[in-house]
Image (cartoon, rainbow, N blue to C red):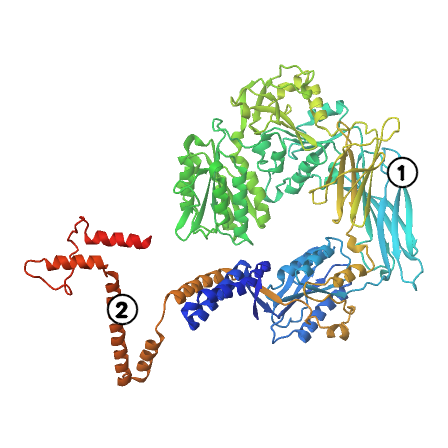
Amino acid sequence: MIRLGFEHPMYLWLLVFLPLLVFFAWTRLAALGRFRQFLAIMIRCVVWTVIVFALAGVQWVRTDDRLTVMYVLDQSESIPASKRKAMLDYVTRNVAKHRNQQRGDRAGIVVFGRDASIEIPPFDDAIPPIRRLESLGTRTDATNLESALNLAQASLSEDTARRIVVVTDGNENLGAANRLARRLTQAGVGIDVVPVRLSGGDEVLVEKIDLPTNIRKGQPFEARVVINRYADAENQKPLKGKLRLTQKVGGEESLVLEQSIELDPDKSVFPIRHQIEQPAAYVYEASFEPDEESGDTLKQNNAATAYTYVRGQGRVLMIVDHRAPDEFDLLIETLLDANIEVVKQPSDNLFGSLAELQAYDAVILAGVPRVSEGNADGLTSMSDLQIEMLVRNTQQLGAGLMMIGGKESFGAGGWTGTKIEEAMPVDFKIKNDKVQAVGALAIIMHASEMAQGNYWQKVIGKAAVEQLGPSDYAGVLHWTMNGDVWMWGGNGGMLPVGPNKRAMLAALNRMTAGDMPQFDPAMKMAVAGLTRLGNKASVKHCIIISDGDPTAPSNATVRAFKNGNITISTVAVASHGMIENQRLQQIATATGGKYYSVKDGRALPRIFQREARRVSKPLVMEFENGERPEVVFAHPVLDGIDRRLPPIGGLVLTQTKNSSLPQVLIRSPRPEAPENSTVLAVWNYGLGRTAALTTDTGARWASSWTQWSEYDRFFAQLVRWLMRPTGDTGKYSIATNVRDGEVQVVVNALDNEDSFLNFLDMNATVLGPDLKPIELKMSQSAPGRYVGSFPGGQSGNYFVNVIPGPGAAPLSTGVTVPYSEEYRVRESNEALMQALVALKPRDGQAGQLMPELNERVADDLIEFDTFRDGVAPARSIRDAWHWFVLAGCGLFLADVFVRRVAIPIAPMLAALNRMRTGKPADVKQTARLDSLKRAKQQAAEQTASRRAAVRFERTSAESDEAVEIVGGNADGGKSAATAKPDAKTDTADGKSYTERLLEAKRRAGK
């Protein structure tokens, strides 16, 4: 059904002027005749109405009584699996019974847990039986009803009436469904609820482990494990089981307690005496296992964890290359002599969590490459997650971070483009064209039969380009139907990365490598492109990725690579056998490259990160006779240090960041560009500090420093400046508490005289389990008491860092959320369900709370009609004012035509009659019309003659004068009766006849 609507209906009041319009038009248009007068007035009224409708924003409003129903099913783990399965049966049967097929009703399904997804989009047919959900996945450890309602609203058809049927227990622990539901009902969406009521049953819940806030080394303390048992009224006997308490530190786990206990209904507390001997970060885990399976429903809530950190004098974590673990032992001994505890960690056995890093006040990457040497299966690397942990530990939690140089450090070690580069005061890519640190890399791509082969080739191609510096050259060869072609750069194929990086990445993203028939053409193109660069690139390297089945290259092609000092590394992916592997291995061996054989594409990025380091070799600058670095900036790190430094034999080239924050303390005379000659640079990064030492500590380049009298003092001051502040925290205390999905942080502040410290401006940061910062604002709630809170809906460790004031040592703590709130609740949220159905949609009726859903769907629930009326019909609105304006313009022209043009109706009717009948007009009638025309013409001529006679009639005096003139004519002339005056004849006074006429006219006018 289509009707008119108005966007600005107040303009319709202008229609009250229609009677005035009719009144004035009736009097002014009376001369037109009755018919034309009536027609003109009607057209004017319609024009006025159309103009008013256009001003009021007239719209076409189409209404549709079809109905779309979205069933929103709660699949979170707080609901028993049998009831979650019953939901699917309920939807299928309810839609089959009540959907109006003739009307074209639609139905769909949205399922949700922590996230929401569409299982079946709305369509106008019956829903088939569903045996298994395909779209939800495994994220069912939380209830996010808000996201489910939001997705359901987006899925509803706008051209139908809309209703949402929610099947849930109401125990949401993420989002705020009430707020979104109000917006839905304001938009005309109805909400019904099918309640899922939970029975208490037998359930054991390990709530928490209570640890003291201030634990000191060697001090005995008491930990308390709190366990809550829910039991039916008829089952009040004790539940037997085993309680275990374990302690984790530095990746190692030890058993603290294991004993048999009995749980009575309600809450039980078990105190445990314990003692910590070493400063570190500790994670405790308590678990309960019942002897009888029937005594517990959920297993996910049978364990709880707690985190504590015991601070010592100061500890440093030094990560070293596992191939040379003793290279930095001299530096370790120097720091130990300065009372700085150092823990050495090889690169093949790295930390696994952010909690482990909390035991250290600084982390040192001592000449460590990102990917260590070895065979393909034995490559070790620092993952992106571990890099993120290091950076967040500095930026958000205030720990120090330092990178020490070496031949496989900074950009030469594959750290380019990582978060570590962002945290350092220098960039690892050289952007100065004057510094000759240019490499060239050519990649030959061959389609592989490995799973997701094309995807992994795109990944490694982009990873290689990301590793290269702006001045480095890159080219990619792939096979197409037209043969081997360069992906960019035309026939040359090699372009600098800097100005072309974005285009290169876009081209790699579109790449589809073909099945290359032979190696020789592509390798000839690669060696020609690399050779053409000449001295522009000091290191040239080629990588071939293939399954090995193309024909082997010729000996001349391989010699061309060797003569050009170009190495080739080959990667065999999903090769067909021994012959193909040997073919690729021979190519790599002949040119001095590396050979890899992989079965899984996930190993490829690490290989290419390692191979890209070959192109980064020009970043290492070594001095044959040594160069003496210079101190260029006074800094606390150099207090008391002799400004005359020993010479160094080399460094890794870097680029000072384009910012005023980095402070370059020491530079080398070479290279001449000051932004690339940094030896030591420092800056503040977030809450922590970072430092970049581009030379080493004495094993190779700084060997003369080991005899330097200031060696110990220099490195001790540098590391102490980096370390997280460990000064006296005064009389500050920090505590945390978890309740209802919120983590509360409380800080008590006293001065040395035990007086409250008020009006402090505290800076607080929180890192969640996903290493993302969480906002935390501390506000004063009482004298000397400051409180803040943040959401703790995600299970895992949260790290809190609070700086009480300027210059104060930070207060650090951690809190562990062992499991989601989903596993804590035991009763349905009736209040939320009642609130949802109480909302009344616009132009509709409030929702209904339907009968309860059980393991077997009851008939009364199926009989409840979810496709009933009670929601506003769908309305589609389209603006129509512009059409009304167009119509008004046309009608205005019609109004002008009616008033100005008289149409002879009778002749037109006669002509139409002749056309219709085909007969001539009546002779008598024609003759009568002709006589009338002649009479009319004669009457007109007589009237014109009389008017002319009256106009030229003379006075008596003038007539006499004319007679005399005529009578005096010599030949007797004409008679006075027939004589005509001569307009050109002058009178006695000299005036012509025309002038006398004008004077007579003026006199008459007066």
Q: Is residue 258 above or below residue 200?
A: above
Q: Which residue is mark 2?
A: 943
- Residue 909 position, x and y percent, is 35, 78
Element type where label 2 sits in the image: helix
Element type where label 1 sits in the image: strand
Give the image quarter of residue 370. top right
- Residue 553 position, x and y percent, is 42, 45
Residue kind at label 2, given as amino acid type:
Thr
Q: Nearer the viewer, residue 662 or 966?
A: 966
Which mark is nearer the camera, 2 or 1?
A: 2
Rounded to the nearest angstrom, the CA distance separating label 2 from label 1 is: 136 Å
Left or right of 863, for residue 578: left
Do the residues under discs 2 and 1 have CB atoms within 8 angstroms? no
Give the image quarter of residue 8. bottom right
What crowding class fits label 2: few (fewer than 14 Cα within 10 Å), some (14-19), or many (20 or more)?
Answer: few
What crowding class fits label 1: few (fewer than 14 Cα within 10 Å), some (14-19), or many (20 or more)?
Answer: some
Q: Is residue 785 above or below residue 896?
A: above
Q: Nearer the viewer, residue 651 or 565?
A: 651
Left or right of 962, for residue 395: right
Residue at (53%, 52%) from the top-left corner? 453
Residue kind at label 1, given as amino acid type:
Phe
Q: Residue 221's mark?
A: 1
Quadrant of the frame with the N terminus: bottom right
